[in-house]
C-alpha cells in the first residue's frame, strides 16, 4: 500500500471514530479491555505491513479508548479537541517540522510568535512576557521554577549556571497546601526537597488564606494557583501578590485550566494575577487543543530565555526561539493548535465556552443538591465536588458511574473523606448531555445506597 492510501485510510478510520463519539461507551467495556491482549505480540524480526498495523490499532485499540474526545466525559479536566486545532495538527504531521528555531521552520517560528502574542492578549497578561509552548503544565512549571530560582540567585550575586546549587544562598519555596501534585513534582526534581517546602494554609473553600500567609522575602518563590483541581478555587491574588512584590519574592501561578477564566465574565476571580512573575497554563485542557500543548509565560522575557537557553555553534537562534524558552530542543510546533483555536473561536468564542461550562457546572451542582447529594464547593468555575450521605455510598456511586459507560468522572479525597469530582471542559458538551448526566445520577441515587 502506498503512503497516500495508508494516510487516507488512517483519516477515514479517524473520521469513523469521531462519528461514533456521541454513542460510544465513555469507559471501555471489560471485553474491549481484555481484547487488548492482541497487542502482546513478540517484536517482529522483519516488519509487518503498515496497513495491518494501522488496522490492528483501530480494530483493537479504538474500542479500548476512553471517550474523552466526546461530550459525556467529565473526568479530570480533559477538554476535547476543537475541529480547527485537530485539523491543523493533521497538516502539521505532513510537514513534520522541528519547531525549535526559525532556521528549522520559518512557518512554525512565525505562527508560534503570533500565538504567543494572542495568548498574552486573551489572558490579559503583561505584553512584554515571553511565551514558551511546551508539552505540559508540568514541564512548563519546571521551566518557570528553574527560571525563578536562577533569577532570585542572580539578585543575590550568585551565578547559578556556573556555580550550581552547592554553597548557594538558600531559596525558600512557599506553596498552597492544595498545590497540584505536578508543582510539587517540579520542585522535587529541581532539588527543593519536599520537607523544606513551606505550606500556606487554605481557607474553607480551598484558596490560600491571605491572613495566614507565611513570611516572604527576596529569596522566596511563592506558588499560587488559579483553579484548584477539586474545587476550581482561586487564591486571592491581589493582596498576596502585593505583599510578595513588596518583599521581593518571585510569584509563580499554576493556572493549568483556571487561567482561562480570565478571558471571560469570570475574570474577577483572577484579579491581581497580572502582578505575578510567571504563569503556566495548558491548552490541552480548557482551550480544547489536542495533547500535548501547554505554555510557560514569564514577565521577564530575558530571564526565561537565559534559563532555557540552548544555543550551540551549529544552532544558535534569537532569544525568543522556542528552543530557548522551553525544556525541549526538538519539538512539534505546540503553538500552532493554540493559534488555530484562538483564531477560530476568537476572543468571544473562548469566553463563551468558559462561561457555558461554568453555567453547566452550576446547574449540575444545583441538581445534585436537589437530589440530596452534598455539594462541597462553591462551583466558582467548571468543577463540582460532591459526595453521598456515607463514604460507602460515595464509593458505590463512583463504581456505578464508571461502569455505566454512559459517562465518566473520578473520585478524590476531600478533607479526609472520599468525594467525587465532575469537570465540565469539553466544547462538545451540550445542555442535553448535562441533563443525561443528572438523570443518571438521579437513577443511581437509589442503587448506590449502602446495603
Ligand atoms: C492538570 C494540572 C496540572 C498539570 O498539567 P499537565 O499539563 O497535565 O502537566 C497542573 N496543575 C493543575 C491545577 C492541573 O489541573
Image (cartoon, grey):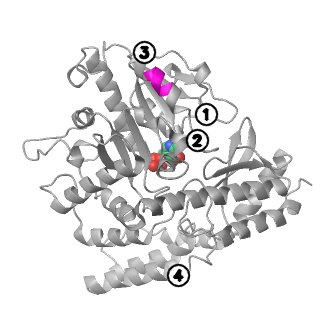
Q: Earlier in the sequence, mark 2 or mark 1?
A: 1
Give the Cα distance between marks 4 and 2: 34 Å
State the residue at coordinates (46%, 58%).
287
Alpha carbon of mark 2 to alpha carbon of mark 1: how far? 8 Å
Which numbered disc, 2 or 3, marks the residue that appears first in the sequence? 3
Look at the image and tell me in which quarter the N terminus lies: bottom left
Where is mark 2, residue-wise? Answer: 228
Which of disc 4 and disc 1 is earlier in sequence?
4
Quick check: 311 left or right of 427? left
Instruction: Note whether residue 98 is visible.
Output: no
| Viewer-nearest residue: 202 or 332 | 202
Residue carrying label 4: 19
Tell me the residue at 23%/69% (across/down).
95
- Residue 344 against residue 110 in the figure, above or below: below
Circle 4 SS class: helix
- For mark 2, give the secondary structure: loop
Q: Main secondary structure of the magenta part?
A: helix
Amino acid at each position: 500500500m502506498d503512503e497516500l492510501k495508508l494516510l487516507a485510510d488512517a483519516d477515514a478510520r479517524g473520521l469513523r471514530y469521531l462519528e461514533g463519539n456521541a454513542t460510544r461507551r465513555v469507559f471501555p467495556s471489560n471485553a474491549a479491555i481484555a481484547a487488548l491482549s492482541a497487542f502482546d505480540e513478540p517484536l517482529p524480526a522483519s516488519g509487518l505491513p503498515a496497513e495491518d498495523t494501522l488496522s490492528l490499532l483501530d480494530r483493537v485499540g479504538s474500542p479500548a479508548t476512553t471517550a474523552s474526545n466526546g461530550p459525556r466525559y467529565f473526568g479530570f479536566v480533559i477538554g476535547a479537541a476543537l475541529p480547527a486545532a485537530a485539523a491543523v495538527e493533521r497538516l502539521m504531521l505532513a510537514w513534520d517540522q522541528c519547531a525549535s528555531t526559525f532556521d528549522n521552520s520559518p512557518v512554525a517560528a512565525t505562527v508560534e510568535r503570533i500565538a504567543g502574542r494572542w495568548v498574552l492578549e486573551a489572558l490579559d497578561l503583561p505584553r512584554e512576557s515571553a511565551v514558551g509552548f511546551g508539552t505540559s503544565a508540568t514541564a512548563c512549571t519546571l521551566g518557570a521554577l528553574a527560571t525563578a530560582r536562577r533569577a532570585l540567585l542572580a539578585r543575590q550575586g550568585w551565578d547559578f549556571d556556573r556555580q550550581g546549587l552547592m554553597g548557594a544562598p538558600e531559596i525558600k519555596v512557599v506553596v498552597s497546601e492544595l498545590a497540584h501534585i505536578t508543582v510539587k513534582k517540579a520542585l522535587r526534581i529541581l532539588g527543593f526537597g519536599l520537607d523544606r517546602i513551606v505550606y500556606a494554609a487554605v481557607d474553607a473553600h480551598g484558596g490560600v488564606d491571605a491572613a495566614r500567609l507565611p513570611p516572604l522575602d527576596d529569596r522566596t518563590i511563592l506558588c499560587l494557583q488559579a483553579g484548584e483541581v477539586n474545587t476550581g478555587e482561586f487564591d486571592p491574588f491581589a493582596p498576596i501578590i502585593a505583599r510578595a512584590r513588596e518583599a521581593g519574592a518571585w510569584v509563580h501561578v499554576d493556572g493549568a485550566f483556571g487561567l482561562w477564566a480570565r478571558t471571560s465574565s469570570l475574570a474577577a476571580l483572577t484579579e491581581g494575577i497580572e502582578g505575578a512573575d510567571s504563569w503556566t497554563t495548558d491548552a490541552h485542557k480548557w482551550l480544547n487543543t489536542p495533547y500535548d500543548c501547554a505554555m510557560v509565560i514569564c514577565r521577564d522575557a530575558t530571564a526565561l530565555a537565559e534559563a532555557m537557553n540552548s544555543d550551540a555553534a551549529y544552532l544558535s537562534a534569537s532569544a525568543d526561539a522556542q528552543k530557548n524558552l522551553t525544556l525541549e530542543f526538538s519539538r512539534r510546533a505546540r503553538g500552532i493548535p493554540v493559534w488555530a483555536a484562538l483564531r477560530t473561536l476568537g476572543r468571544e468564542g473562548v469566553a463563551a465556552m468558559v462561561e457555558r461550562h461554568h453555567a453547566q457546572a452550576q446547574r449540575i451542582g444545583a441538581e445534585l443538591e436537589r437530589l440530596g447529594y452534598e455539594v462541597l464547593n462553591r462551583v466558582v468555575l467548571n468543577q463540582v465536588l460532591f459526595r453521598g450521605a456515607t463514604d460507602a455510598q460515595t464509593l458505590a456511586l463512583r463504581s456505578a458511574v464508571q461502569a455505566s459507560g454512559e459517562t465518566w468522572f473520578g473520585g478524590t479525597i476531600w478533607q479526609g473523606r472520599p468525594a467525587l469530582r465532575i469537570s465540565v471542559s469539553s466544547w462538545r458538551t451540550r445542555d442535553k448531555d448535562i441533563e443525561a448526566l443528572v438523570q443518571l445520577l438521579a437513577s443511581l441515587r437509589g442503587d448506590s445506597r449502602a446495603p
